[in-house]
Image: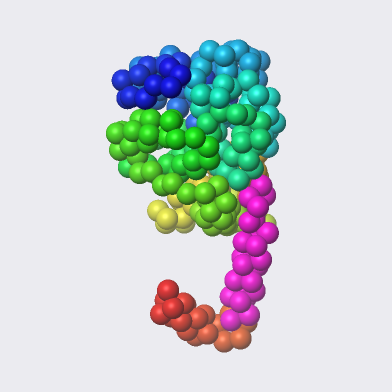
Amino acid sequence: MRGTALKGTDKFPIGIIGGTGGIGRWFAAFFEKEGHTVHVSGRDTGLRPAQMAEACPVVIVSVPIGVTEAVIREVGPHVKKDSLLMDLTSLKAGPVRAMLEASASEVIGLHPLFGPGVPALEGQNVVLCPARGSRWLPWVRDTLGKKGATLIETTPERHDEIMAVVQALNHLNTLVLGLSIREAGISREELERFSTPLFRARLAAVENLFSHPQLYAEIIAGNPHASEILRFHERAIGTVKSLIGETGAKALEERIRQENRNG
């Protein structure tokens, strides 16, 4: 495949490190449906990094955020110059930098903005962070785009800045809601009896977060912009608290109206 133009009909093997769980398993099934042979590896199963890089012109790292850069530095030196190294993690600046440093291959950071429960790519957002090379990028665009994905291309730094709101702040609010509910001491059963549809959805989000502590802790705390977002969050809570303490609903209503006019 060296030096040849890539086409959608080209069917080469793809390796996914971490392809035994979560989003890695989802993409393994996706690429298999596209006609590729997919080699997956888990912590103690499948090809070792050097073997995968030798066998597969596309290697994808899909492991927990906290070990992503270590895995990249392990496999990166073995990925060939005319091959493609990608990652699927929720943060991009650190992993993309690690891929550029560890490998001479083409590099693309990829962040699918959906979980493994979605049935298909159609209508889903996928962020691309092209970092080195141009041979593989059209193939990635075509492979994902023809299935209806909405592709957003940006820098790793801008991605992480936006994700500080879309993910870190969002999950932080869910975490705070869950902690506050537990502080209130009201049972889940009692809350369910009084719940609105919206609150039931929020309770489901809380339950999901507490079921995956490593994932959400790394998304919140691992984002390089998390500290700034935390300051914004604390300031907003302080503002709301002071408004309620001053004149109750009237002051709070006026602040909401003001923000609505400004927004």
Q: In the displayed structure, does residue 43 sit left or right of residue 155?
A: right
Picture coordinates of residue 204, whole percent (x, y)? 50, 46
Residue lying at the far front in this picture: please name it: 3
Residue in view at x 53 percent, y 34 percent: 107
Q: Nearer the viewer, residue 253 or 162?
A: 162
Q: Nearer the viewer, residue 165 or 138?
A: 138
> What predominant SS class does the magenta segment belong to?
helix
Q: In the displayed structure, does residue 122 sit left or right of residue 156?
A: left
* Residue 120 showing in the rendered view: no
Seen in the picture, residue 135 relative to 193 is either above or below; the reply is above
Residue in view at x 49 percent, y 20 percent: 57
Q: Nearer the viewer, residue 101 or 244?
A: 101
Picture coordinates of residue 222, whole percent (x, y)? 66, 47
Colour scheme: rainbow
Find residue 8 and report its image quarter: top left
Magenta residues, as a range? Answer: 221-243
Find residue 242 and report its image quarter: bottom right
Q: In the displayed structure, does residue 227 sit left or right of residue 151?
A: right
Residue in view at x 51 percent, y 17 percent: 56
Picture coordinates of residue 260, whole percent (x, y)? 42, 76
Q: Quadrant of the C terminus?
A: bottom left
Q: Is residue 241 magenta?
A: yes
* Residue 66 showing in the rendered view: yes
Q: Is residue 19 magenta?
A: no
Picture coordinates of residue 196, whole percent (x, y)? 42, 56
Q: How many marks?
A: 0
Q: Quadrant of the N terminus?
A: top left
Residue in view at x 65 percent, y 52 percent: 224
